[in-house]
Amino acid sequence: MVKSALLLTALSSLALACNGQSTAKHKNTGNEPMIIKKRTPEDIGSRYYAANAAIDKRVEELYAAMTPQQRAAQMIMVASSETLGYPYATTVKTSVQAQNAANVLFLKGTRDQFIKQHDELVGYEIEGLVPLFACDCEPTLLHNKFPGQPKMDATANLKTEDAVRASVDTINHLMDEIGISINFAPIVDIAKNAAIINKRSFGNDPALIMKQAGVFIDETQKDGKAATIKHFPGHGAVTGDTHKQSVFINGKMTELATFEKVMNQSKPVFVMVGHISVRNNPEGFNTENDRPATTSRKIVTELLRDKMDFKGIITTDAMNMQASKNFPDADWEAAKAGVDLVLMPADPAKLNRLIAAEITKGSALGKQFEASVKRMIKLKLLQ
């Protein structure tokens, strides 16, 4: 009985030492890593949105202990991909090492490359917090993002809830192997836009999208990983591809109701805002000067944060996309618009300096950034 009590005490101490973050580890035994994964008592969505005085207190303590630069780094995510022009050694590692960015997207590369990178990057802590790691792990794209992985059924072909669960379980397993805790999926846009959405979507029926996306989010988040719905306020009903050009919603945002219902029913931790411009909106939510929604306070703060009362983390789509690059100083404008996380900024060091300067001044904008930083810290404590 005494031995059992001592064992329980030791296990409890170990859990506390983990500080709430992911404990995925890799011990090489031959060619395959051994995964040690901490299981969470509730899904990450429930825990993120639940009132928790102890977590809130710890967030305040960590924020107070950080320098302005370290705080700003929480709002920045850099991407790693040797084949897409984001080499690990000269862009990713240097940004994290210099504390200009505190989060990493594994954009495109092999499983083994990313395991090695993950295991090095977790050594760069800020006040005991390791970087958050993310992927664009959509079923349709997984084999392209992670060369060597088997091709999965496209999202459009996942016709049953069981098929969605099986797909997510496969994705979760890969995320566990690498040490990734955020999935920038699922898409809740309709499939109508053949240029870029198409088979990445669950279809054109909003009711089906809500149901299947809900299963995807639940299966992801009950496994301790944060899910993301995208591309707010809707990329499916527009013409064109924001990777290549500016695109426009002309009039009513017809996909908005789907986003709102999925947000309220399924509680994804993240909403990703797309680089979509809005014109002639009857409710007045036009993006100023045809700017992309990612840089529009009307969309990010007035619509998503305030009117729709989204309490989670707002991230941009990748800021290297053409629709974003068409607008001057898009990285900084996105931060000012109210996003919590700027994904793949053109110059992470410059963006960090700008954010840190406002935090140091204690301006109204600096207070906005403070709230964003604290949202990111909270997620790090819970994963």
Image (spheres, helix red, strand yellow):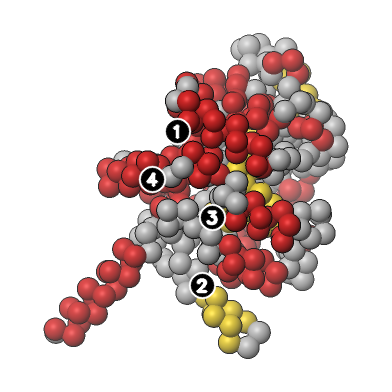
Q: Compared with residue 309, is residue 342 higher up or lower down, i.e. above or below?
A: below
Pointers 2 and 4 in contact (C-beta within 8 Å): no
Q: Nearer the viewer, residue 58 or 55?
A: 58
Locate the N terminus by quadrant: bottom left
Q: CA distance from mark 2 to mark 4?
A: 27 Å
Q: CA distance from mark 1 to mark 2?
A: 31 Å
Mark 1 sits on what residue? 371
Mark 2 sits on what residue? 25
Q: What mark, if any, has residue 131 been given in the picture?
A: 3
Q: CA distance from mark 2 to mark 3?
A: 14 Å
Of pointers 2 and 3, the one earlier in the residue sequence: 2
Locate the C terminus by quadrant: bottom left
User: Looking at the rendering, which quadrant does residue 232 occupy?
Assistant: top right
Residue 369 visible at all? yes
Q: Position of residue 243 (x, y in %)?
A: 81, 39
Tell me which amino acid carries mark 2. Lys
> How crowded is the residue under tag 1: few (<14 C-alpha within 10 Å), some, or many (20+)?
few
Q: Nearer the viewer, mark 2 or mark 4?
A: 4
> How crowded is the residue under tag 3: few (<14 C-alpha within 10 Å), some, or many (20+)?
many
> How crowded is the residue under tag 4: few (<14 C-alpha within 10 Å), some, or many (20+)?
few
Tell me which amino acid carries mark 3. Pro
Tell me which amino acid carries mark 1. Ala
Secondary element at tag 1: helix
> How crowded is the residue under tag 2: few (<14 C-alpha within 10 Å), some, or many (20+)?
some
Q: Residue at position x 48%, y 30% from top? A: 360
